[in-house]
Amino acid sequence: MVSPAGGTPQSVINGPDCSVVVITYNDATRLPRAVRSVLGQSLRNVEAIIVDDASTDDTARMARRLQREDRRVRYLRREVNSGGCGAPRNDGVAAARAPYVMFLDSDDELTRHACKSMLLEAERTGADFVTGQISRFYDRSGKTRRYYPELFTRRRTVEGIAREPEMFLDSFSTNKLYRAEMLRRLPFREDLHYEDHVFTTELYCAARRFAVVPWVVYLWHRAAEESESRLSISLNIGEMDNVRQRIRAARLSDGILRENGLGHLVTARQRRFVRQDLRVYLNPLPSRGPVWAEEFASLVRPYLAELEPAVFEPVDPVVRVCCHFILDGPADELVVAARSLSEPKAAPRFAVREGGRTYWGTAQARELDITSLRMAELPYSATRLRHEAAFDTDGTRITLTVRTYDPFGVLAATPDWSAFMEFKNHRVRLAPRAQDDGSRLSEVTVDLSRLRQGRLGHDSHYDPKISIVRADGRITSDRLLVDPAAEPVTIAFPWHRVTVRAQGQAAFLRVRWRREGLLRWVAPLLGRARDSLVRRLSGPDLKLRVYKTLIRVVPPREDLVLFESDVGAGCTGSPRYIYEELRRRRVPFDMVWSVAANRRNFPSDAGLVRRMSWRYLWTMARAGYWVDSHGLPLAYPKPTGTRYLQTWHGQGLKTVGFDAPDLRADFAEPRARWRAAVARWDALVSPSAEFERIFLPSNGYEGPVLRYGSPRCDVLVHGDEDAVRRAKDRLEIPRGLRVLLYAPTYRDRAKSSGMSVRADLDMMAEALAGSWVVILRTHPVERYRVPQRLRHFVRPAGSYPEVNHLILASDALLTDYSSLMCDYAVTGRPMLFLIDDWDEYRRVERGAHHDLPAIAPGPCLTTTEELIHALRDLDAVAASFAARYTEFHRLWCSDERGHATAKVVDAFFGPAPRPLPDPVENGASAGDRRGAKEREPARSRGSAGDRDPLPPGWRR
Amino acid sequence: MSGRPRSVLFACMDADTLGGIQRVTHTVAQGLAERGYDVHVLGLHRAETPFRYVRRPGYRQHVIHRTPMGGLSWLGTRRERRRLGRLLRELGPGFAVLTSPGVVSRLKDLLPERLLPIGQYHGSYEHARGSWHLGSVRGHYGDLEQAVFLSEDDARLFSEHALLPNTWAIPNPLPAWPERTATLTGHRVLGVGRLEGVKRFDRLISAFAEARRTVNTVNTGNTRHTGGGGTDGDGDWELRLIGEGTELERLRAHARACGVADRVVFRGAVPAADMGREYANGSVLGLSSEHEGLPLVLGEAASHGVPSVAFDVSGGVRSLVVDGETGLLAPPADVPALAAALARLTASERERRRLGTAARAHAEAFRPERVLDRWETLFDQVTR
């Protein structure tokens, strides 16, 4: 091979920069891939040393061939097989000519920059070794998964293992680049299997400094994700020896730490054993059966018994339960517990609740305490049952026998429920019978060939579930566990082949459909043809061109209104109330809502168009009115004659428009696009003078302004008891608890990251769960999943259709910089602000027009401790902010008097046909309570406001 | 040396537009050509009004499409491949420097094996993460031989957040190195750049107004106590903004609102050849941008011995200004801090001299020869 850039490889002249020791044994087919990953390194000056542990296959010939292809390959052959990895690696190190060495197994690969990137890092930092990210590469699916990525997130140098003992989790020898002279002082043990573990412990003891790099340096090829969970008997026996070796390596490692005066790190290393080594066997344990489990437990027991209790403290409660059953038996309980370690992390069969604590199984022991999982306190729809099933087939019919355990007494506490088995979109009623041991047994038979499959059949998989439906229609579902040792069953009928099997290490039931026969070929072809046609016929450029032609040709219809709120996310915000007002007035308009993909909760009597579909463009082109809260597709010009009402969706301290980060960057195009989009507006709804002061110049808007308050805030002035009841019911808020609405806004530089949820919800749950419940309203661009252990305290409501109802259902608001604070002020209820990143947010992240700490109508807090403190004493805290609250209300809400919708509709669509007398102010309005001065409604400016005198307000 | 790769291809979206990336590219191309490399500068598109950077180029220039940047038709893509193929066949072993994420994604799969691809990114990490650039850099630059950023800090940030194993840093070169330095006795703060939103000269004007107030107050006090003389705050300070752009009127209005309308001079655009005189008459340079990659105005001012005050918005800024040693940095968008830094320098000629002298020494690293040395080190690194 010629050096890629021409010329002679430097290794021939000066010796290589890095030696890669590739050990192999009877792996001639994969060896070339490994060696080529070395020869293809961006560091050209490498040598690949193949160390053959006396293979009996074609390895020698293959190695010679690789040598002929490239002079950088060397080949060493051991005469006698060593039975491990230690001896060949030592041979390779002895033969290495470079100052730096890496190891590679013949079934794996190095990433292209592995050698050079770590070599440079070693030279730059002077580290004794450099360690990088390992990624598992699943050969079958082609997917990769990084190994403990949190260890490698930061690129850094570590001054000795004592600084970061969690690095014990990285005990591979292969993802590292070493100084050769260091390796020669630390030979691998040749007499045990987990020589890596012992070696890395010695390495960590010896290294004064090591460097960590965040990128992937090593691809660990895994034949298949599940092969390890289905071992044959002979392998099982081999595996037991494996366990023995791993414990031996752990003991040796503990000893090495003590000998090196690092006894204080033994606990940290043993924690690694429980967190990682033990899990290697516990995860697949369900498929091994109780005999194996018994033997495994007896092997591990003596070592576990030696460990300090402190080792178990930070460990997952279910792992702790497993350790308890390893130590005290019985083995079949160990198997039951091990099945809850992996997805779907099933509930226990039985649980004991005593003194506010929850215990696994039927006994009450400290090691069995699983309270922190908070499984027993879940709201009904999230509650957990354990279904263990066996399946059997007869022709195309499958029969499932399901045993249902209800460890937390949910079914007992629910007076009226019915159970169903759910196959994707097919539901079968179950008739569970109570058993002596407290479980329930049901049996169900389904003819798979009778299930609906769609016109072109079905080619995917799903996990059947059991749903328990309560009298009020609320549902709780769980997947089914099946016997992990059960063989997959395949059922064939015309056009389809269906496989029913145990999936994953916890073995849950999965049904996989495959098209058969002609359908197998035709369906994907048709699908691809359709996709390509759709792509060609509805590309964004084509759509825009057609639209532009349309608006020149077709005239807008005076009686067609297009509504859009939050880019199609829902029927909410000001457009919703304007829509409802027009309905109430029976204005003979055709009203159509824009709906983003997968959104629901639109009024059943409204016309719907999917956003950006052809029908949507047609509606845009034909509508005489556009009503929107964010911005209809920015690049789309408005037809002549169409009137566009921009209601906007909030006001507050954030920078907007040209001052917001999207438009502040050094690209001119987005700014020009926004300028053109704003020029389409015919009227802008303004909630306050302060809004106008900031918003108009920030967006370069100079058209008419309708300042009557916000249509979306009318309901906050009047209240809506029904909606509150519905919201509380839907979110399963128990009676008697105070409700905190937590609505953090997004961070411009970390959208979809979950980073906006900055309160420590675990700490809050610990302190407040008895008296408060949190409704978590994340911003639409944010992604955050509430973990199960918090569901008893936190109700996720990011996609709840109407935020106003959440506001009304809450007793207080916690936010950071969300514009929601200005709407919330209408209610007069207490607000708290968690603003630990205020400086960052104000200066760099987003930018602000107001100094929040100076104007906030409630306490500005920076830690969860302060927040808990403030919530415990909320009434007094709120009272101390009364004056600030009044001032805040005056600034933002003095125009919110509950009639904005009617006035905006009058001003934009023309006055109502049947004027009613101006209603007397109902004294409960928050505006009055906060002492806002009664005054004439603000005059709107410009043409839309020229209807003088203003029509009177309208009441629902 | 016959075996060493000597071809260098610089590929830009548009190589003849007036802009920062292009200026740097032509400067480095000319420098390498003078060092004996076979250099080619390739523009995928032609600028609407082409600009000539080097009077007698020692390199060859190529343009693929005669149209300005924009989408390509199917035929256009075919034509691009054909023309590129013809050009690339001519080149011997060497390096292809792809100067932006757009160029990387368009060319990286078309290069022959003997041209080793090097990707450049001319923005800061902070700017990339606010746009599609970060995703593109993460997705493509790791496959290249080397990913080159403007500063060590940027290289580190990309290695952590885009998981790039192949980062490297080379600064942009200064266009010239002056013989003489500024006297620093005049009372003039300079602001240099396009008058566009991203440069946020409004913040510099606010900070200038604030600093002037502080210094004047202090000086009035001093005068009373010491009987005048000695301080160099005498004579009012002026802020001189050099550049043109769409924000001019807004900035004028802002200066009026800040009460410094008579102290802010809008000089308009100044030809590169005359910039030396402007720097020589300046005493402090202020930089208040929202985003910057490697703002060479800081380096140019430093080469004239003029110290800078700047917002710490990127690794590039930090590589040009060592806070407290060669200039003063303020946290991004922290106008009061920028004002305090300005006040400190306008109040003390000694401090300006101390920082200015150190700044010139520090800016040596950005001299064209030094930057070209770093390119050659990079080439050695790539073929190591």
Image (tube, coloured by chain):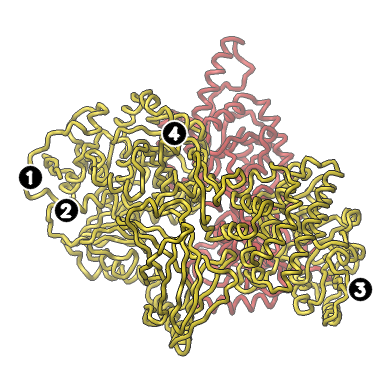
Chain colours: A yellow, B red
CA gap between label 2 and label 3 equals 89 Å
Label 1: chain letter: A
Q: Chain of mark 2?
A: A
Q: Splitting the image into 4 quarters, where does residue A341 fall?
A: bottom right
User: Gap in Å between the C-alphas at discs 2 and 1?
Assistant: 14 Å
User: Residue type at mark 1?
Assistant: Pro
Q: Nearer the viewer, residue B3 or B264?
A: B3
Q: Is residue B330 left or right of residue A610?
A: right
Residue at 72% across / 62% down in the picture? A295
Residue labelled with disc 3: A80
Amino acid found under the numbered disc labelled 4: Ala
Specify the label residue A915 is tagged with.
Answer: 1
- The residue to which callout 4 is attached is B255
Which one is in front, A521 or A656? A521
Marks 3 and 4: same chain?
A: no
Question: Where residue A366 sits: x, y (%)?
Answer: 60, 43
Q: Quadrant of the C terminus of chain A?
A: top left
Q: Amino acid at mark 2?
A: Leu
- Contact (CB < 8 A) between labels 4 and 2? no
Say which label, 2 or 1, has the lower sequence index: 2
Foreground: disc 4 or disc 1: 1
